[in-house]
Image (cartoon, rainbow, N blue to C red):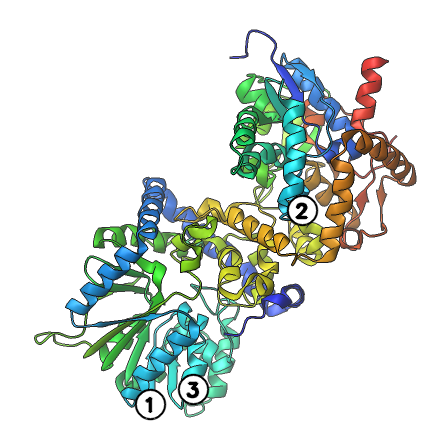
């Protein structure tokens, strides 16, 4: 997917005045967080599970090569294949090759953010291969030609009325007067449309929430069951995911699963949790004849051993964006790339470059809410902060910021000069602001455009305190 | 248990209080003295947070060194701000992680640094504030106070000790007001959206005074409240706890 993160301010401004999006976000921000809080309250050991999950992930990341190789060996033992992709282009060409070798015409797809990350659908389409998204949210977005605005609920920015209109527009073979008022109507209609895709697909592509090194299994969680149909009904199942998804054992995976659904949607467990281990065996009643796993690096391994490594603990639950006041304000599309919200602000600079993504780690108040809900305790503000340092070191910050800091530091580093200058400045400003506040101030339009600026009381504390002690 | 000897407390005034609202600094001194502390005010400029937040590590380090030296002789460092005390407590040690000598000094200082209301209650054992202010109030939890410095019930406990003060909680008191230091001018549209939602929550309480423990957040909320024409007073919680009813609210003319 082509990033548009450099346009963050303009995209955010549009988002703030889009009435449909405002309605969707208002509903969204009280949904998942309330459910999560309830789920957490019902599980007294939740905090302990967070610590345990963090430890598992930290351990795995510090031996990532070992666990990935173990995973590969187990996949091979069970008759499957592992393909390594250094970047998005390599991942695309691996999948295109697998598809063309099998003469594939139709591909069913389960939800996969990594597939968005590598822009897979466009590549398949360009090669004349039809790929159909089977997750309801993703299916809707594909019809609309949009990208996900949330990593768990990709179409949360849409209302059911908008979706009903899209279905009427595209499903023209159905009776025009059919009822589409209820979410269940929409789901049933999408199911009907997708049934043929599941049955006729040459290849099924899914993501993976976890990879298990000890068994060579891949795990997906869904609430619609579309992933199971995608991967069991086609001849060939391709799993596409990032290298950081591996955990050592099945027990570790279950620990993660206990945290994932609770953190994401507040469910105790998602409706479907599907384990895939190799292709169909001789006495299996169903399943794909081929099993391939494509493991994408795309900038991830470069984070190992750096202060940013912790971001690789992410299990993509979405809790950070569900609780983020900036995400609540602008929604996911403003971020301009696949991973929005706090995790996007911490991860995207590594994947699409600091220059393109520089706004994302800046567009945070460091309020810390994300870190407080992250199931694997990623210090998201700390990582965003580190990206700001990289930006500053590489001189990518806007001149206004650099010059402002320079001028301010000139005084701040010299306490006596600072006290003198500020004492005079505050006297002047206090006198000018006798009304109590300024409606506008030179160079402060960012503030006074929408807020009055409270005037200073007139003297500085340090000068008053000195007088009082000596007076 | 309060220490037997009066502890020597260095007041970290914070830039905003120093420049814009000295009355908060004096309220802090009054409260600390009432709690049995010996207060000193070392000569100081800024803790370096604006530089730190914008990724300018070199400037942040230089300012941090000056601050560490200025406060080294104090038993405690106390600030009427979660954000500035959080800078010393959480970020100074990070700042010097590659410089062991300064890291040790930074950590020693960090361990002695507290936000005012938490220090008064949890360290000095203060359980009653100084009467003098009366009104219905609502309290906003500033993010760094809440999540970096563990400030939540301490200011509320002190407010509850004041006979004339009646606290009504707002919806989402712990949701960010959109200030975020330079965030509010770098992303003014988003910041305005956030503070507007905050203002709605404040107004819905029917309280006549808004309180918080960080002047940046207070100026942001006061500025938006008055721009939208709401007649709600805005004060730093320390002023109310010190029984100061006379100073004009934030953004209002004296007298
Ligand atoms: S950063 Fe944490 S909260 Fe955000 S998606 Fe990843 S695991 Fe979930």
- Helix, strand or loop at label 3? It is helix
Answer above or below: position of B84 versus A280.
above
Where is residue A406 shown, x and y percent of the image? 75, 46
Residue placed most toward the observer, A11 or A103: A103
Q: Secondary structure at mark 2?
A: loop
User: Which image quadrant is residue B65 in?
Assistant: top right
Q: Is residue B76 left or right of residue A199?
A: right
Q: Position of residue B246 (x, y in %)?
A: 81, 25
The residue positioned farthest toward the left in the image shown:
A283
Q: Residues within 10 Å of mark 2 (few under 14, many from 20)?
A: many
| Label 1 sits on residue | A105
Residue under mark 1: which chain is it in? Answer: A
For the residues marked 2 and 1, what is the alpha-carbon distance in whole angstroms? 53 Å
Residue B216 appearing in the image: yes
Most extreme residue toward the top, as rendered?
B4
Vertical order, B249 against A69 (above or below): above
Q: Nearer the viewer, mark 2 or mark 1?
A: 1
* Residue pointed to by mark 2: B179
Query: Would residue A420 be found to the left or right of residue A54 on screen?
Result: right
Q: Residues within 10 Å of mark 3 (few under 14, many from 20)?
A: few
Disc 3 designates what residue? A125
Q: Answer yes or no: is residue A457 visible.
A: no
**Is there CB contact under 8 Å for labels 3 and 1?**
no
Q: Position of residue A63 (x, y in %)?
A: 30, 52
Picture quarter with the C terminus of chain A? top right
Task: Please identify the quarter of the rendering in which residue B68 is found.
Answer: top right
State the mark number for residue A269. none
Mark 1: secondary structure? loop
Residue visible at 56% across and 59% down in the picture: A26
């Amino acid at each position: 997917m082509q990033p548009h993160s450099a346009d963050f301010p303009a995209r955010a401004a549009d988002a703030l005045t889009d009435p449909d999006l405002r309605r969707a976000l208002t509903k969204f921000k009280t949904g998942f967080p309330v459910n999560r809080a309830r789920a957490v309250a019902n599980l007294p050991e939740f905090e302990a599970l967070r610590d345990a999950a963090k430890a598992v992930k930290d351990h795995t990341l510090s031996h990532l090569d070992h666990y990935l190789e173990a995973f590969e060996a187990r996949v091979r033992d069970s008759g499957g294949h592992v393909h390594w992709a250094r970047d998005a282009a390599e991942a695309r060409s691996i999948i295109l090759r697998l598809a063309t070798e099998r003469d594939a015409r139709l591909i069913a797809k389960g939800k996969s953010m990594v597939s968005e990350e590598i822009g897979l659908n466009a590549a398949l389409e360009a090669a004349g291969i039809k790929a159909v998204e089977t997750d309801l949210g993703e299916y809707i977005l594909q019809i609309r030609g949009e990208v996900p605005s949330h990593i768990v609920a990709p179409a949360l920015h849409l209302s059911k009325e908008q979706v009903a209109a899209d279905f009427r527009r595209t499903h023209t073979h159905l009776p025009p007067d059919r009822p589409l008022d209820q979410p269940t109507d929409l789901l049933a209609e999408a199911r009907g449309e997708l049934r043929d895709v599941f049955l006729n697909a040459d290849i099924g592509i899914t993501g993976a929430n976890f990879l298990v090194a000890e068994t060579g299994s891949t795990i997906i969680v869904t609430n619609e069951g579309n992933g199971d149909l995608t991967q069991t009904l086609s001849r060939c199942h391709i799993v596409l995911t990032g290298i950081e998804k591996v955990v050592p054992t099945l027990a570790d995976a279950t620990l993660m699963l206990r945290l994932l659904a609770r953190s994401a949607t507040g469910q105790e467990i998602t409706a479907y949790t599907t384990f895939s281990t190799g292709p169909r065996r001789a006495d299996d009643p169903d399943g794909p004849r081929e099993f391939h796993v494509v493991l994408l690096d795309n900038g991830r391994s470069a984070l190992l051993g750096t202060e940013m490594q912790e971001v690789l603990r992410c299990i993509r639950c979405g809790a950070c964006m569900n609780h983020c006041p900036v995400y609540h304000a602008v929604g996911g599309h403003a971020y301009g790339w696949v991973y929005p919200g706090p995790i996007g602000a911490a991860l995207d600079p590594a994947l699409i470059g600091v220059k393109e993504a520089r706004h994302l780690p800046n567009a945070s108040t460091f309020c810390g809410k994300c870190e407080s809900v992250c199931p694997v305790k990623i210090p998201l503000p700390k990582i965003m902060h580190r990206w700001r340092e990289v930006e500053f070191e590489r001189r990518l910050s806007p001149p206004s910021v650099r010059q402002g800091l320079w001028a301010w530091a000139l005084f701040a580093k010299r306490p006596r000069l600072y006290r003198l200058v500020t004492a005079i400045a505050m006297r002047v400003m206090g006198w000018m602001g006798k009304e109590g506040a300024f409606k506008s101030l030179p160079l402060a339009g960012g503030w006074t455009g929408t807020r009055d600026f409270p005037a200073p009381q007139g003297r500085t504390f340090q000068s008053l305190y000195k007088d009082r002690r000596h007076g | 248990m309060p220490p037997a000897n009066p502890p020597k407390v260095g007041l970290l005034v914070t830039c905003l209080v120093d420049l814009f609202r000295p009355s908060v600094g004096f309220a802090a001194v009054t409260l600390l003295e009432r709690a049995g502390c010996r207060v000193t005010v070392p000569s100081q400029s800024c803790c370096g947070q604006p530089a730190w937040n914008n990724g300018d590590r070199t400037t942040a380090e230089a300012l941090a060194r000056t601050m560490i030296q200025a406060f080294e002789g104090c038993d405690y460092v106390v600030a009427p701000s979660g954000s500035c005390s959080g800078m010393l407590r959480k970020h100074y040690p990070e700042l010097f992680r590659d410089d062991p000598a300064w890291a040790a000094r930074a950590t020693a200082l960090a361990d002695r640094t507290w936000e005012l209301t938490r220090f008064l209650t949890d360290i000095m054992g203060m359980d009653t504030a100084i009467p003098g202010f009366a009104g219905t109030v609502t309290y906003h939890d500033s993010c760094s106070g809440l999540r970096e410095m563990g400030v939540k019930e301490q200011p509320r406990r002190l407010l509850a000790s004041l006979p004339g003060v009646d606290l009504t909680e707002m919806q989402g008191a712990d949701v960010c007001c959109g200030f975020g230091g330079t965030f509010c001018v770098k992303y003014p549209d988003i910041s305005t959206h956030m503070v507007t939602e905050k203002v709605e929550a404040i107004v819905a309480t029917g309280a006549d005074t808004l309180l918080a423990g960080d002047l940046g957040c207070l100026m942001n909320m006061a500025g938006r409240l008055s721009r939208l024409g709401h007649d709600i007073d805005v004060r730093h919680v320390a002023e109310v706890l010190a029984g100061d009813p006379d100073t004009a609210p934030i953004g209002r003319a004296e007298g």
